[in-house]
Amino acid sequence: MEFNQVVRARHSFRGFLPQQVDKETLEAVFETANWAPSNCNVQPWHVHVLSGAACDRMREKMVARASVDTAGNPDFPWQGKFTGDYKSRQICSAVGLWEHQGVTRDDHKKRAWSWMRNFQFFDAPHIAFIFVTDEFPELVRLAGDVGMYSQTLMLAMADAGIGSCPQTSVSCFPDLVREELGIESNFKLLLGLSFGYVDESDNANNLRTERDSLEKTTTFYS
């Protein structure tokens, strides 16, 4: 695909087939992502990729934990609330997803099911957990680096015909992930990325969110 097509083809998929991506393709997309820019080329991301049985074990443990602990203990707790245009976009996205999943706003049981789909990794056969270490004083700046890495990774996947879904929801349980993977506590979990081949029969994958006009987001000077 042309670059513009890849960017527009990428979106958050929420239904995957059990078929795994082969090792050669996996290594190729992650190698491409490694060329993402970062401040002074420090490349602060640490990525752990789970496939097959390892992914299934993590999925089972994540679901079990999320079923009894709705808040978790994220390394980077969410503070504040969206307001104004940000809130409107958030609501449109959430309601749009529910509509495609057959969820109504007053159906709390089905809404809970929709939320738990996050911890099932939307049935994806792979998940990548992306960490940074706590040795850096400017974690906000590092988040920008990891964002550029994550976008590069998702675009590389899209170019290879692989769907993905970035998930901050799974970062609610970093201790569980560190314990399962044998990772030291100084590694802080920013997000997870579920990925695999898209299940075209899952209506959730038909959701397409819109983008605001340039007039609302971008200012040009001359």
Image: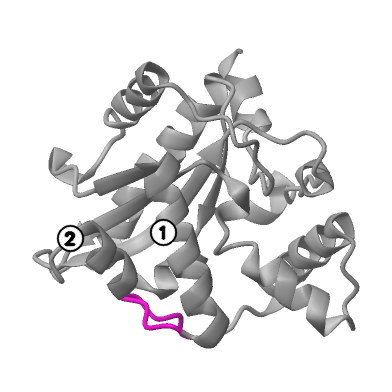
The picture places residue 55, in percent across and down from the top left corner, at: 43, 49
Report how many numbered discs are placed on residues in the image.
2
Choose between 49 and 219: the one closer to the eye: 49
Residue at 72% x, 67% y: name it: 114
The picture places residue 14, in percent across and down from the top left corner, at: 67, 49
Label whose residue precedes the other's in the sequence (1 or 2): 1
Task: Tell me: residue 106, above or below residue 126.
Answer: below
* C-alpha gap between disc 1 and disc 2: 13 Å
Magenta: main secondary structure equals loop
Q: Which amino acid does label 2 sit on?
A: Gly
The picture places residue 58, in percent across and down from the top left corner, at: 41, 59
Query: Magenta includes 209?
Result: no
Residue 183 visible within the image: yes
Task: Tell me: residue 127, above or below residue 175.
Answer: above
Which image quadrant for residue 110?
Answer: bottom right
Kindly state the secondary structure of the residue where label 1 is placed. Answer: helix
Residue at 34% x, 75% y: name it: 76
Q: Which amino acid does label 1 sit on?
A: Met
Which image quadrant for residue 1?
Answer: top right
Residue 70 visible within the image: no
**In this picture, residue 46 sits left or right of residue 53:** left
Choose between 165 and 43: the one closer to the eye: 165
Bounds of the magenta segment? 72-79
Choose between 37 and 158: the one closer to the eye: 158
Kindly state the secondary structure of the residue where label 2 is placed. Answer: loop
**In this picture, residue 66 sits left or right of residue 197:** left
Callout 2 crowding tier (Cα within 10 Å): few <14, some 14–19, many ≥20: few
Which image quadrant for residue 164?
Answer: top right
**In this picture, residue 183 sits left or right of residue 65:** left
Residue for badge 1? 58
Residue for badge 2? 182
